[in-house]
Image (spheres, grey):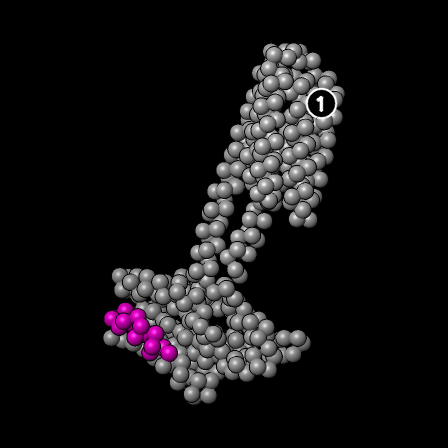
Amino acid sequence: MESSKLKETYEKQQYQSQANLVYVNTIIIGAILVFIYFFILKTYSIAVANIVLLAVSYISIRLNRKEQYTLSSLIFITTVAFTAFLQIHEFGLRTGFQYFYLNLSGLVMFTNWKHWQKAAGTMLLVSSFILSFQLNYQATPPVELSYFWVFFLPTVNILLNVAGVANSAHYYITITKKAHQTLNDLAMKDYLTGLMNRTSFDYFLLELCEGRVKKGHGMSILLLDLDHFKRINDTYGHLCGDELLRQIEIILQEQTRKEDCAARYGGEEFVIVSKSDSIEETPLFAESICKRVRDMQFTYKDQMISVTLSIGALYISPQASTHIQEALELADQLLYKAKSAGRNRVVSEQLAS
């Protein structure tokens, strides 16, 4: 996948998640304010405006599910701005609703609007913030609030604005972390099977060998090759071959332990590295994998396809001090012997010193 497409796909998923969080929080807080406006302060016009905001927040969530992100954010930001204007007019500047314009201007930067739309939206919201001060600075608000509500409403607004900033920060932090993880997976995992790729396998093998020497453990290296894979590709198509590789990956994950390493070594070739305490473990382990693949009921487009493996299995004793590359080459030679001997078999050997 191209990096630009990957970026677009991930940001779309993350944006939907963060935007929905904003909409859900707005519904929760808005419902509390509707109750206060209706039954306590009896400011019915403001209560109705907040009911409209609740409905728009819900609609925005539904639009997000349909990936209509531009429309959902536009109607939400517009409705919040209008509701803030009504509340400033009704209660005055002391309640702090004017600061929603600044929070919304920051929210605009997280939308998927075009650059000129973001610039225009930010300018309008900042202008609305300045205008709200000019129009209401010395004006007497229609509703005279008690000391409690003069304290309560600004406190709620401060918390909402802080929550908005925190959500924005969380959005960027999450994007950074997941982008790093995605890039790491792309660099270290095989795109088709999800197993380690050749690069990450080389690092793992080096660490495993060092740990083996320190702890005095033996080690097994198994090189596996799908028999007649080219013939399967030529006969049934590459999509069939891809599906077969994914099925082999599932089997290898089932057969290996957490401390073992299974990797796609290249093409139809796989490699397994595991800790072993005796020479008998290596061929038995390899034979069990061979049998599991042989007994697999692999079907593609309602057609049963026979699948077998050839394995070169090398056991390295704790006393052996051979170079990693030499061990891999020896395992490769064993694999070649298995294929030369008729395939669908294991050829194993011990490296004692």
Tally the numbered discs.
1
Q: Which residues are magenta?
A: 316-332
> Which residue is most to the bottom?
341
Work out whether 2 lies above or below 22.
below
Secondary structure beneath dot 1 equals helix
Q: Mark 1 is on which residue type?
A: Ile
Q: Position of residue 162 (x, y in %)?
A: 53, 29
Q: Residue at x 69, y 49 (%)?
A: 66
- Judged left or right of residue 78, residue 257 is left
Judging depth in this view, the residue of 334 and 265 nearest the camera is 265
Judging depth in this view, the residue of 231 and 338 nearest the camera is 231
Q: Is residue 16 magenta?
A: no
Q: Residue at x 57, y 75 (%)?
A: 238
- Is residue 292 at least partly visible in the picture? yes
Judging depth in this view, the residue of 285 and 252 nearest the camera is 252
Q: Position of residue 69 (x, y in %)?
A: 64, 45
Quadrant of the rendered image containing residue 347: bottom left
Q: Position of residue 201 (x, y in %)?
A: 39, 65
Q: Position of residue 256 (x, y in %)?
A: 45, 66
Work out whether 300 lies above or below 34.
below
Image quadrant holding the C terminus, namely: bottom left
Which residue was labeled with disc 1? 46
- Judged left or right of residue 293, residue 27 is right
Judging depth in this view, the residue of 265 and 261 nearest the camera is 265
Q: Residue at x 72, y 35 (%)?
A: 55
Work out whether 199 lies above or below 111.
below
Q: Residue at x 49, y 49 (%)?
A: 178
- Is residue 279 at least partly visible in the picture? no
Count residues near mark 1 (Cα–Cα under 10 Å), then give few for <14, some for 14-19, many for 20+.
many
